[in-house]
Image: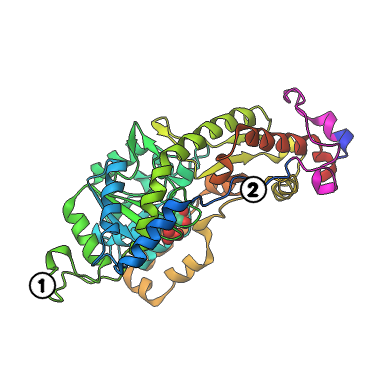
Amino acid sequence: MTPLTRRTFLAAAPAAAPAAAAVTGDKPALKGGKKTRTQPFAAWPRFDQKEENALIEVLKSGKWYRGNGTFVKKFEESYSSLTGAKHCLATTNGTSALIISLDALGVGPGDEVLIPPYTFIATVNSVIRHHALPVFVDSDAATFQMDHRKVEAAINGNTRAIMPVHVAGGIGNLDAFVSIAAKHKIPLIEDACQAHLSEWKGRKVGTYGDAGCFSFQASKNLTSGEGGAILFKDEDARERAYAFHNNGSGLKFIGANFGYSSSGANMRMPEFQAAILLQQMTRLEGQVRTRTENANYLTSLLKQIPGITPATSGDGCTNNARHLFMLRYDAKAFGGLKREVFLKAMAAEGIPCSGGYSPLNSQQFIKTVLASRGYQRLFSAKRLNEWAEQNQCPVNDKICSEAVWFTQNMLLGPRTDMEQIADAVRKIQKFAGELA
Ligand SMILES: Cc1ncc(COP(=O)(O)O)c(C=O)c1O
C-alpha cells in the first residue's frame, strides 16, 4: 500500500477518534521521540520472607519428596478447598497434568481428542504423547476460545475427549462444552493452565470437567517456577491419575511392596514447590481482584480507540483470571500500519507486548507425526486424508494475525499504568503515518 504521510493519515483517520488525550511528545519513541513510559511494569513473581521460611523449613526437614513429606498433601487439600473441587493431584507441571488426565480418563492410541488451535503447544503435545489424533476446532473471533458451535461436527466414533482451553483466563461457552460432552458420553478435560480462579456462573473453572488441569510455571498467575495440578470430580479417576504419576503405583498399593496397578511415569510434585505454592496462594485472591479492576479499566479505555477490540468472555464468565490481556488490532484504523510495526512501536514507548500464538493446526511437525509409521498404523489413510481436509481454522488464522497481548503482571500496578498503555496506543495511532 502507498505509505501515508502524517498529514494524509490524519485526513483519513476515523471521525470517531476519541477526544485527543494527551500523548507524550510530538514524535513516536520508535522515531526517537519521548517514551510514553519509562518505568518497568510490576515485577513477577512476588515473594517475601514467607516463601523463604517455607523453603528453609522443607530443606531442614530433610523430607523433600511427597512420599515422606507433608507439603504436597497440604497443597492438594488447600487447592481443592480454594477451587471448591472434590479431589486434587499435584504434578510436576501443566503438561504432565494434561498427560496424566488423558491417561486417567482412558485416552490412548488411535483415539481422537478435540482441542482448540489457540493455545500453548503443550495442549497439542499431550494428545500426541498418547498417540491420539489432535482434532482442531476453530476459535470464536470475539473470545479467542474454542467455538462451541463447531464442536459437535468434529465428533465421531473415535472421539475420546473434548479439551477446551480457558486461554488467557477467559472462558468460552462452558455450559455448551459440558452438555455436548455429557450428550456424547465423552470426558471433558478443561485445560485451565492459564485460568487460576476464573469462574463460570460463580463456580471455579477446572471443576466443571472430569478433570481440570493447571500450570504453575513461572509466568503463571499462581507459580512455583514449575508445577501443576489436576482437579477431579471422581475419586477413582484421581486414584488412576495418582498411580500414573507415581510410576504406576497407586495409593491402594502403598505398603504392598512394589505393587503396580498400571503403567506410569514419575510426575510427582516436589515438596519445595508445594511449600512455595502454599504461600503464593495467600496472595492469589487479592491479585485476582487487582487484575480484574485494572483489566476492566483498560478495556473501557481501549474500547474507545478505533481499531482496538479487546477479547471478551462467554456470558457465563463471572471472573476472568486475566493471565493475559488480549485484543485484536485492526491495521486499517492505523493507516495500514502492520501489526509487527505496531508491536515494535509499543515496545519503544515502554509498553512491552507481543503478537501471541501462531496457528497450531498448521504446524509442520504435526504433519510429520501423522505421517510417521506408528500413526499410519493407528489411523486409516482415509481418516488421515479427511483430517488434512478438515484441518482448517480460518477464524483462528485471522485472530493469530491480529492479536496483541499484554502479560498479567502489567495488570498488577496502579490504574495509571492502564492509562499509559492506552496513551501509547493513541500516540501510535496519531503518528501511524510516520511509522508506516
Ligand atoms: C494452555 C496451556 N496448557 C498447558 C500448559 C503447560 O504447562 P507447563 O508449562 O506447566 O507444562 C501451559 C503453560 O504454559 C498453557 O498455557
- Between residues 83 and 238, which one lies in front from this camera angle? 83
| x and y percentages locating residue 342 in the rendered image | 72, 45
Q: Magenta segment, which residues? A: 9-36
Q: Mark 2: which amino acid? A: Cys
Q: Of helix, strand and loop, which one carries label 1?
A: loop
Q: CA distance from mark 2 to mark 1?
A: 53 Å
Q: Is residue 16 magenta?
A: yes
Instruction: Respond yes or no on whether mark 2 lies under 8 Å from ligand 1.
Output: no
Left or right side of 394 for 268 = left
| x and y percentages locating residue 372 in the rendered image | 42, 74
By secondary structure, the bulk of the magenta-drawn segment is best described as loop
Label 2 Cα neighbours within 10 Å, binned few <14 / some 14-19 / many ≥20: some
| x and y percentages locating residue 393 in the rendered image | 50, 49
Residue sitting at 54 percent across and 37 percent down? 311
- Between residues 296 and 336, which one lies in front from this camera angle? 296
Task: Name the residue tied to disc 2.
Answer: 353
Labels 2 and 1: the sequence-earlier one: 1
Q: Is residue 12 magenta?
A: yes
Q: Residue furthest left?
A: 256
Task: Name the residue tied to disc 1.
Answer: 256
Q: Of helix, strand and loop, which one carries label 2?
A: loop
